[in-house]
Image (tube, coloured by chain):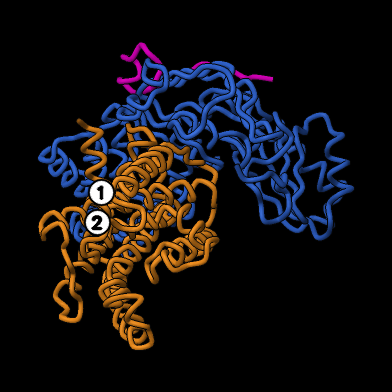
Amino acid sequence: MKLSTTPAATSPTAEAATTPAVEIDDLRYSYGDRTALDGLSLRIPAGSIFGLLGPNGSGKSTLLGILIGRRQAASGSVRALGEPLSTRLRSRMGIVFQEPSLDATMTVRETMHLQGRLFGQPRPATVREANRLLERVGLAERASAMTATLSGGMKRRLELARALLPRPELILLDEPTLALDPDSRQRLWQHLLEANADGCTLLLATNDVHEAERYCQTVALLDAGRLVAQGEPAELKRDLRHDAVRIEWQHDPASEATLMRAWPDVGHVRVAGRTTHVTVDAASPFLTRIFQQSGDRIHSVQIEESTLEDVYFQLVGKAIAPRAEGDGDGEQAE
Amino acid sequence: MSQVEAVLALLARDLRGFFRSRSQLYSSVLFPLMLLAILGTGVSEGLDPRKIHDYVTFLTPGMIVMTALFSSTFSSASYYQDRDSGILKVFLASPHSTRVILLGKTLSSVLIGAAQALLVLGVASLIPAIHFQWQYGVLPSLGLSVFSIALLNFFLSGLGQLLASKISSMQGFHLVMNLVLFPFLFFSGAFFPLNDLPEWLKLAGRVNPLSYGVDMMHLALYADGSGGYFGLPLDFAVLSLLATAVFWFGTGRTVSPDR
């Protein structure tokens, strides 16, 4: 089942670009018996912020690994920035990895300069650009500090500055804000948006629905290496039941969940411990009915805006992010 | 040109890391000198001087080879540190082939191993109890020493890379390296001449690549008119061939992104 596949190209750069930043056709990759990418096809507009949204194991990191040359696809074709993948093409791409990727024995400045040398930049240009980027990400005063002494947020900003140093046209972001506090997260995104405004295409792999909704112009929902749906976040949510209702119960709501699933105006019902998350056509008549039926067992009710999580659940029947309450789908990490 | 720049950048980065690790720098030079003082003096006293003339001087080329052996292989272990810190992924995501990245890293192991071995040679030459013979003349003998140290380090660093392709953890790497290194060292003629050993140990010495390096070093520093155990042409042929092959395959290995 697929929703609209119309790309959202809102930035002027994207509108001007004629060649997609990434073109993927029928891409397949397996880890032994486990299929990671199962005939995936995508077009990522140049200059856009494009999100790959799906749970762990849905193929996001595998796709980034193929784009950066760490993995070889079993079949299918990939082109980036108008060229087939090659070692040389990597000079036009940057990546921020999910896990830390800094050398603790190097200083901030050395980290930047090494990147410049690896990408074949002349030393004066590297020094100038490194200074500019360190200033931009707020690390100029820590240029002489060892990377081991930086906070988690600073390390992430340094990794981003390092990725930006060779002025890439495409940046791959593998859950770049994972484990960052809200302030660091917001600062990192501010720098990412600046890079995008400079014309850089951002390809974000994430399982954070709020991040994808807030920052991505186009989102591709992935499940088990397949494209489930693709479009603008608002567009993806358009076909969804209108309201989302979160009910906290005084006991295990298994019987209430069964009851609600039988109602025609109810979309999907997710159960997480004593909480049910329900999408409905309209919250008011639904709440009237549920209070009539089981009001004495309800602890609290909250009406929420629908998210891409709801879209994903409606299409795939499982949640994106593993949840502590127990409604995760037990997927394996990639 | 940019590939050369990338190799040099990685080389400089590893050398800087090595010099920042003072303990590694000091211990790698102090250990062989300490062994030379303790083992050399102790064994000299208990040895029949008719069998080995001037044991401390005999032992010195072996200690230099041992320094090269340990330092270059332990430098190869920096591969695991880079992998675990995540920086290796960054190198591999740069616009260079895996061979270029491994070449940069392996050359730094060669340089670090060779520099330390030469440092031990330099310090040893200042110790009055050590009497190098320089049988080909000081400069040619010194040149031969440097050449054999370089060949050995190419071989050992390549070997380190080959082993790293098969072993997933640094602990495992150190264990296997010790299993490989110590027999290499003991049956190389570094501690005692291969001449006087039983046949089966002589055989072990012959198939041991390190024996050819030790023989070369003995010829350069210790021997006085002798042609060595294997002889310089055979030493050179075996070591050059092995160093080239192992270095080529070691830097040409694949690096799995999954471990």
Residue placed at 16% from the left, 53% from the top? B143
Where residue A56 sits: x, y (%)? 61, 42
Where residue A173 sits: x, y (%)? 43, 38
Where residue A117 sits: x, y (%)? 22, 40
Where residue B163 sits: x, y (%)? 49, 50
Q: Which residue is mark 2?
A: B15
- Looking at the image, is A67 positioned above or below residue A16? below
Judging from the image, what secondary structure is the residue with disc 1 in?
Answer: helix
Report if residue A25 is visible in the image: yes
Disc number at residue B11? Answer: 1
Residue placed at 27% from the left, 60% from the top? B217
Of all chains in the rendering, the one displayed in blue is: A
- Residue neighbourhood size for the residue with mark 1, other residues' Cα within 10 Å, grouped as few (<14), some (14–19), many (≥20): many
Please, which chain is the residue tagged with disc 2 on?
A: B
CA gap, disc 1 and disc 2:
6 Å
**Type of residue at label 2?**
Leu
Please identify the quadrant where the N terminus of chain B is shown.
top left
Closest to the observer, B248 or B218: B218
Report if residue A311 is visible in the image: no
Closest to the observer, A308 or B126: B126
Say if mark 1 contacts mark 2, CB within 8 Å. Answer: yes
- Looking at the image, is A220 positioned above or below residue A175? above
Q: Which residues are magenta?
A: A1-21
Q: Main secondary structure of the magenta part?
A: loop
Q: Is residue B173 magenta?
A: no
